[in-house]
Amino acid sequence: MSGSDLAAQLSSLSAERDQLALEKAELQDLLLRRQADFDNFRRRSERDRSEFVQYAGMEFVREVLPILDDFERAMGANKISNDYSKGIALIYQRMVDVLKKMGLEPIETEGKTFDPHLHQAVEKVQSEDAEDHAVLGEYQKGYHFKGKLLRPSMVKVAVRP
């Protein structure tokens, strides 16, 4: 072999080595990106699963709220007998306690200012005695479930003439 053949072969091997090093760097970069994508996917999946577990009871509680409303109306109705009203009150309180353990919290409206994020104005009443946009009464209780609004309160709101 001549010197020029060796130089050409060395040059060819150097070019091939450089090409392989470039491909290796690209593959390492691709591997790092895929690992980061997978880690992000894993974290997002875990967060979604955690939220699902945390708020899984939300739909059940939403379906039970009308029953809770019916109990409140029954307790406010004319009493049939003292034992009957005690029984209704006992069942209502047990149901409220169970729902509170699950994460249900009533929205306080008495003495509050109307907040469209928490209240639904069903009636507006002109009043000079109350502050503007003060909640005067509650037609239906609103609730939060684990910090999220489940149902807004239906309220009567004062407006200044």
Image: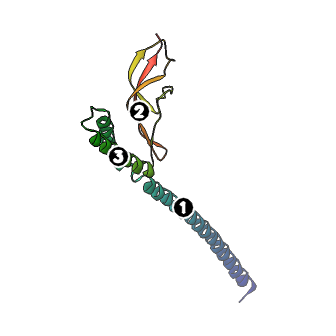
Say few, some or many: other residues with alpha carbon within 10 Å of mark 3 (under 14 / 14 to 19 / 20 or more).
few
Q: Which residue is mark 1?
A: 37
Q: Which numbered tag is attached to residue 90?
A: 3
Q: Nearer the viewer, residue 125 or 13?
A: 125
| Cα gap from disc 1 to disc 3, whole angstroms | 54 Å
Is residue 150 rendered to the left or right of residue 81?
Answer: right
Report the side of 100 relative to 43 (left or right). Answer: left
Kind of element beneath mark 2: strand
N-terminal of the pair, mark 3 or mark 2, is: 3
Q: For mark 2, what is the residue?
A: 153
As displayed, is residue 58 above or below residue 53?
A: above
Q: Nearer the viewer, mark 3 or mark 2?
A: 3
At x 66%, y 73%, the residue is 21
* Place of residue 96 in the rendered image (x, y in percent of width and height, measured from the top left): 39, 46
Disc with the residue nearer the chain's start (1 vs 2):
1
* Element class at badge 3: helix
Give the foreground label among 1 and 2: 2
Q: Which residue lies at the image location 67% right of the left edge and 74% below the top edge? A: 15
Label 2 amino acid?
Answer: Ser
Q: Give the residue type at disc 3.
A: Leu
Q: Report the front residue among 124 and 94.
A: 94
